[in-house]
Image (cartoon, rainbow, N blue to C red):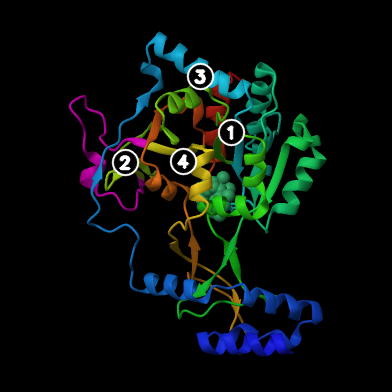
Amino acid sequence: MEKYEKVKEILRKNGQEQLLVCYDKLDNEGKEKLLDQILNIDFEQIKKLYENTKNNKNINSNDDLIEPIDYVDESKLSPEDYKKYKEVGDNIIKEKRLAVLTLAGGQGTRLGYKGPKGKFDIGLDSHESLFELICKPLKKANKEYGVIIPWYIMTSNENNAETVEFFKENNYFGYPENEIKFFVQGEIPMVGEDGKILVNEKGFIKLAADGHGGVFKSMVKSGVLKDLNNRNVEWLVIGPVDNPLINMADPIFLGVTASKKCMAAGKSVVKANPEERVGVFCKRNKMPSVIEYTEISPEMCNLRDEKGELVFGESNVNCNLFNMKRINEVAENELPYHAAHKKADYIDKNGKLVIADKPNAYKYETFIFDAFESMETMAILRVKREEEFAPVKNAEGVDSPATSRELYKKYYNIK
Ligand code: UTP
């Protein structure tokens, strides 16, 4: 009862009394869970996030100085440089200084697939899932280098059990089971347009995944960071689950980054056209950054250099490399949250279920690329789109299972 009174007082102070609307209907275990959830909420943080959203205050101000960023074009490396970088990268892999991490906590809303996106079958005759397709180049690298690259997989509360079960059912796709570690990403409450935190259909706090930028904090919380440090891993590649052509164990990527003494790196592909809806690498106030397609002006989109190339044309494919020293530092700092206006069903303060037919709430997410702005040195490696980029984002049209499947088949010469 003491706990209940304490929670009530906290809620009163913060004007969030609606959070106990279903309390009386819950069993004892549920009551306890709800009280703990509330005690874990950082009300000050939520208040600030909501106020920023309401005032339309974006983290990226228009006064930012945006400049193009230097990159290395892999296809233009001289044979000597290629050999030099490959040797450096080969050694990193051979000496077990590389680990990889797959971001698999997303909801795949655009794709409209209900289960974990990694289970999705892009329609190859083999019916291999995205997880299996991503696993293949890792197994190949293990064989080539005589190592087993530790593979970390970030899931969400929503899809963790199903993901783990899927790996078990498929015998871990032949990957050594003890070298795969799953961990769950963080969550943050969703907030209504009036600033009130939402209650879900079961009477608990309505939580949503905190974005792929949450990976750093979740690595700390889950013990993954400690595990990596204990294993003396020096470099971590973090990549998405939805690109079956992703090449994470890439010696050139490692070699270029380490040789240039950079603490992080990102792979880019040339923007398909000025209007392509992708973020592009840039320098923001002199630091590495990504400018989102929603932020970039039409003039900047179309700006070309003397060779006719787009000045802001290095599309971010979300395959990034970090030195572990930097990961340890980034994990200690907060990344900025971005608000997304979403549809959310919830229980209102009178205990009535509200079904959303239009966006009615805010979801707050952090993005991995916001961590770039604290990296004073970052290498951008331009790779070939047709060799490394076949994203599955939408159910149909661009970046859909059909386009991804065709790119995959073309690259692997599958009939
Ligand atoms: P996206 O945001 O592009 O894809 O995430 P999504 O979340 O799967 O799909 P939409 O936006 O709902 O349609 C890029 C990568 O980051 C992971 C995704 O699983 C994907 O691999 N991700 C995204 C997370 O791991 N956690 C998140 O909170 C968000």
Q: Quadrant of residue 118?
A: top right
Q: Which residue is mark 1?
A: 244
| Mark 3: secondary structure | helix
Indicate the amino acid at tag 4. Answer: Val
Against 393, residue 340 (above or below) is below
Q: Earlier in the sequence, mark 4 or mark 3?
A: 3
- Tell me if mark 2 has few (under 14), some (14-19) or many (20+) residues whose alpha carbon lies within 10 angstroms of its own: many
Membership of 311 in magenta stretch:
yes
Q: Which residue is mark 4?
A: 398
Q: Are marks 4 and 3 in contact (CB under 8 Å)?
A: no
Indicate the amino acid at tag 1. Answer: Pro
Q: Earlier in the sequence, mark 1 or mark 2?
A: 1
Nearer the camera: disc 3 or disc 1: 3
Asked whether 375 or 300 is in front, the reply is 375
Q: Quadrant of residue 193?
A: bottom left
Q: Quadrant of residue 376?
A: top left
Nearer the camera: disc 4 or disc 3: 3
Q: Are marks 1 and 2 in contact (CB under 8 Å)?
A: no
Image spot of residue 170 (x, y percent): 79, 37
- Distance from the alpha carbon under mark 1 to that under mark 2: 26 Å
Q: Are marks 3 and 2 in contact (CB under 8 Å)?
A: no
Q: Which residue is mark 2?
A: 282
Q: Is residue 55 left or right of residue 157?
A: left
Asked whether 77 or 352 is in front, the reply is 77
* Residue 163, visible in the rendered structure: yes
Residue 88, label in figure = 3
